[in-house]
Image (cartoon, rainbow, N blue to C red):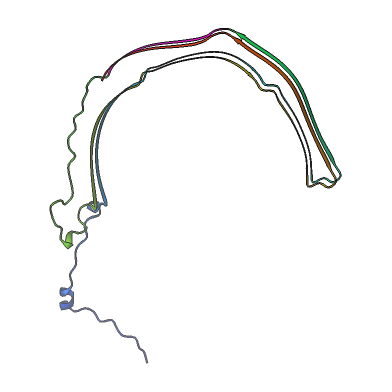
Amino acid sequence: MSMEQEPNPLTAEELASQGATALPDKEVASILDLNADLDLGIDAAAPIDLAVAANANAAAPIDAAASANILSAGSEAQALADQGVIIDQGITADATAESNQSSTIDQGTDTTETEAAPTSGTEGTVPDATSALDGDLLNVNVDLAADADISAPINGAVAANANVAAPIDAAVAANVGSIDSDAFAVAQQDAIINQQIDGEATATADQESDIDQ
């Protein structure tokens, strides 16, 4: 005995009692409505004047020795570094830096005029249930007008006399994972450094700016 039931079609009265709302067209059912109106007027000026003068002596003798035994039994590692340094540095000079800057900046009083961006949406109205999908879900209106006059005259002067000496002596010996091993590291350093500076370091910066914004 078959338990299947034949489908019963709807009658004309049942079809007439059903209600439906047509969906809006795809092109009018946007999610985001963004209207941006940007009007920017920027005048920027940054004259830069820099003078640098330097006298320098640099010496850096480096002596290094390294020895290692890794995963070796009955081995011996030795490292010996012996350094003797005699450094005599003398500077007889004048370091002079002069920086003269004269700036005349006229950025005017230009202004920009913008029109208000058109508003959209359903402000002031109450939509009914049948128009819930009409129009835009989010309306953003941006109207920005900005005028900026920026000026940054920069003037700098640097003068230096320097003596630099850096003798470095290093010795490294290592036994890693080894049995009955000896590691020796000897580092001996003798350094005699004489540094002398006979001179003047002079930095002069003269700045004159006439800015009309």
Q: Position of residue 23 (x, y in %)?
A: 22, 60
Q: Position of residue 164 (x, y in %)?
A: 62, 19
From this viewpoint, which residue is outermost toward the bottom?
1
8 vs 68, nearest the viewer: 68
In this picture, residue 53 sits left or right of residue 17: right
Rendered position, 42 above or below 16 = above
Residue drawn at x 35%, y 88% is: 3
Quarter occupied by the C terminus: top left
- The reply to whether the magenta stretch includes residue 127 is no
148 vs 193, nearest the viewer: 193
Residue drawn at x 25%, y 54% is: 26
Residue drawn at x 19%, y 64% is: 21
Q: How many marks?
A: 0
Residues rendered magenta in the picture: 93-106
- The reply to whether the magenta stretch includes residue 104 is yes
Rendered position, 9 above or below 159 = below
- Prevailing secondary structure of the magenta residues: strand
The image quarter in which residue 209 lies: top left
30 vs 105, nearest the viewer: 105
From this viewpoint, which residue is outermost toward the left?
124
Q: Position of residue 38 (x, y in %)?
A: 25, 35
Q: Position of residue 175 (x, y in %)?
A: 79, 42
The image quarter in which residue 191 lies: top right
Quarter occupied by the N terminus: bottom left
